[in-house]
Amino acid sequence: MKLKQGRIGFAAGTSLAALAVFSSEVFSIDSKTMYANGNASYAALPLAVMISLLILLPAAAVSEGGLAGLFADAFGKAGGAVAAAVVSVGFVRAAAKPMTGFLEVLARLVFDGVPYARILLYIMPVTVLIAWKGFESIGRLALVFSGLIFVSVLIAAASAAPEFEVSRLYPLPSVNADTAGKTLSGTAFALPPLAALLTNEKGLGGKRNVLKTAAAAAALSAVLICFTQLALGLVYPYGILSGLSMPLYRINFLSLRQSYALRLDKLFIMMWLTGCVISCAYLVYSASLLLTVSFSARDVTPAVFTLSAAVFCFATAEFSEKYAAVSFAESFFSRFGALFAAVPILLAAAVGSIRKGRRIPS
Amino acid sequence: MFMRLTDIVGFDKEKRSFELYEKEKGTPDPFGAWRDGRAKDEKEPPFPRSVCEAYELFSKEFNRGKNGDVVLRRFLTGKRRASLAVYMNGMADDTKVNDFILRPLMTFEGERITLKGLLENTIRIGETRRVSSLNEVFLAVMDGMTALFLDGESEAAILETHGFEKRAIGSAENEKVVSGPKESFTESLRTNITLMRRLIHEKDLVAETGLTGGGGNTRLAIVYREGVTNEALLTEIKRRLGRIRTGSILTSGMLGQMIEDDRDSPLPQILSTERPDRAASRVMQGCVCILVEGSPFALIMPVTFFSLMNSPEDVYLRKPLGTMLRLVRYAGAAASVLLPGYFLSLTLYHHGILSTEVLSTVMASRMMVFEPIGVEMLLLLFIFQLIREAGQRVPGNIGQAIGIIGGLVMGQAAVTAHLASPVVLIIVAASGLGNFCIPDYQTQLAASYFRIFAVIAAWMGGLLGLSAAVIAAACHMAGLKSFGVPYLAPFAPRAARKRPLIFRGDIGMHERPDDVTNTSFDGRLEEEE
């Protein structure tokens, strides 16, 4: 067996999951939809993270042998493999989405006019390498970079403090259909990184560690997301925000104008891109592991390469507006993306808990 | 066919990996396998029962007709019992053999002559032992000992008569410190063990000597602290030593490559040091030290990236100074690796980051330079490597002169000839200086070659390419292990530590061994209490 699971500790696991949740939530959001009728992202996105955690908890409680084991117990071997394939699509989608955001910013603001695919050709080999090295390397890499990435985010957000104005937060968020919709949309990207922890149950040293790590990562990322989105809301009114792709990058220009060789905006975006690469590799590896175990394969490598190619296609396809199928897929995933990961996990948790309940008396 | 293919490429076969934090399954080969130094299936000749037989055997085995330095001395012990002394001329001390072995035996006047009795009462040599294995006798003779045979005995006596010439203890040339011990290891294994023992006054210090596995020629010693060093680590090291199958004479550098985890990695997973104080300090922390006969370097294992970045000087200086030294060293190392690539990406792709003044200075300095800036950078880096290599190979002071000529004259000439611009020259020189801040030579080399890789990546893709190169390198380091200890420990993975990672802690905090080596030090303390 060449599953490359290794073993990581609480600190590495938390850094990895928090980094992945943060990247998925902050760099994946569609500004047009998110800020269309006001800005509630600083409440909606952390809420989405907590909902994701709530979806994961029952699954983690009844799972034996990770997510693959949970699916196999609940739906049988064949059904479990199908469920794993569906969830893997959700993982791949969650891995590709932040990459798309970065591609857009890099192509428009950093490397003016360079084709998306060419930029991706620098990013994808590294992503494949990290995913191929396995869970242990990914976790340690996240531990190395997460501190720098989170500090850079905090500096970027805090450095815009002179521009903060509370009136820009108007209209205040309220529990309405719009907020609920945003939360659901956010769940689409927060659930896969947390569910991936369950996939790597062995690498984390057991179910108990998975739960502990998921809770810590969710809390950490929710705080950071809230802080970031609040800073953005205080700087830009929602009308402007809805027209900006990756507003966190734009915020740098407010405070770091006219500085010299250490101008931080480019360094920051490279730092955040590093976080995105690590979280993408983490999701690709987790999806590969899930498929490998579910289909009783012995080596995770073929799945890693295949799913990395899928991420490449997902990320570049979004810019190919001439194909109707791509537009359809994009709107389909925007609406129902959350269901890909959430429904199989919830169903499996429900079936698993019923079966477990039956087994206890016997 | 497919299965055959998968066998060839090693598809789905997990790479064997040793994790120090876990007990390995299975029992490793016993240490005796490498102590003996012969392959298990090699047949040993029968032990000679008479002196004549022994004489014939040794004459044949050592090609005495051609070998002038093998001495086979036949004599009568107590004027009546036939005896034979075998030793190597030059390896053994003639005075010891004549005065403390031959003379007392020839003038022996006792009634009963037995090997045991002679060793107890007559032979005036400190280290003696009786062996019944001919292989052990051969090895001992080749090592400078004297073998003594008595007619009719089923054992031989091995007597310590080492007496070969060796270099005196000199000062460390590659790991110089301003304030601290100056002496360094020599090529003599015995001297090196003594140097370690002089520094470590602990009764648990063990120096196991033996040969590399499979009939190897290399004599070595494993130095560690019994009861402190992790047993799994020790077993794994012995297992790897036992697996060495080579007829080559191994130096410490070659031996290190044969036993480390990832031979293809440019980064060292073993610390090679010529300083006994550094080796002793690591052994006190629970690490294992291997000393090799003929090599003036000790191999220390396991190591982490952070231990490779430490210098003995850090603890010899006061805490604030030691901390500053370390910070400068890390900054130098970062500049060494990243500065040329960063500069190249700014000038080629991200002009916006540079101010108009800086940009115009760079452009003005490159006005007459005909090659692209990427080529210019690579050319200068290549010349820098060239000067470094030439400076090392040329003996003594001429090497220093080459460094000066290369640095000043060639640099000036290159600028005058419009081969290089002053700004790029300064960047390469600063990067080169930063590289010399890295204390470990092999890490220095790895960093200097990664720098070239980073420049190419930055040339191709600006900050994006540079980031990709850095992530790839970090990924490699994150997955690397040194004898089961993760390379980036105790930072990634986090391991409890009693002293700061980069900042130098108090001297008092160094009393306990490093946690990354997972020593049994704490357990031993409890037992003692």
Image (cartoon, coloured by chain):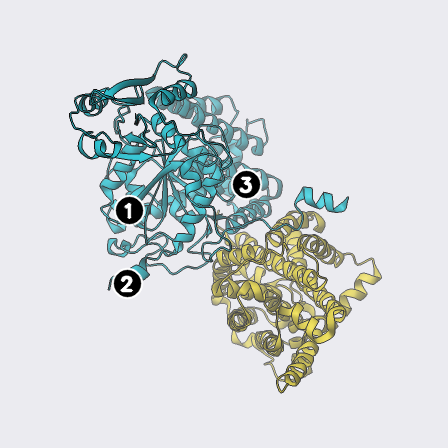
Chain colours: A yellow, B cyan
Give the amino acid at mark 1.
Answer: Leu
Nearer to me, B193 or B403: B193
Residue B527 marker: 2
Q: CA distance from mark 2 to mark 1?
A: 18 Å
* Residue corresponding to mark 1: B205
Give the amino acid at mark 3.
Answer: Ala
The secondary structure type at the circle numbered 2 is: helix
Residue A246 marker: none
- Can residue A115 be seen? no
Q: Position of residue B130 (x, y in %)?
A: 30, 35
Does residue A59 lie above or below B434 as drawn? below
When asked about the image quadrant of residue A236, the answer is bottom right
CB contact under 8 Å: marks 2 and 3: no
Residue B454 marker: 3
- Horizontal side, residue A295 vs residue B433: left or right: right
- In which chain is the residue bearing label 1? B
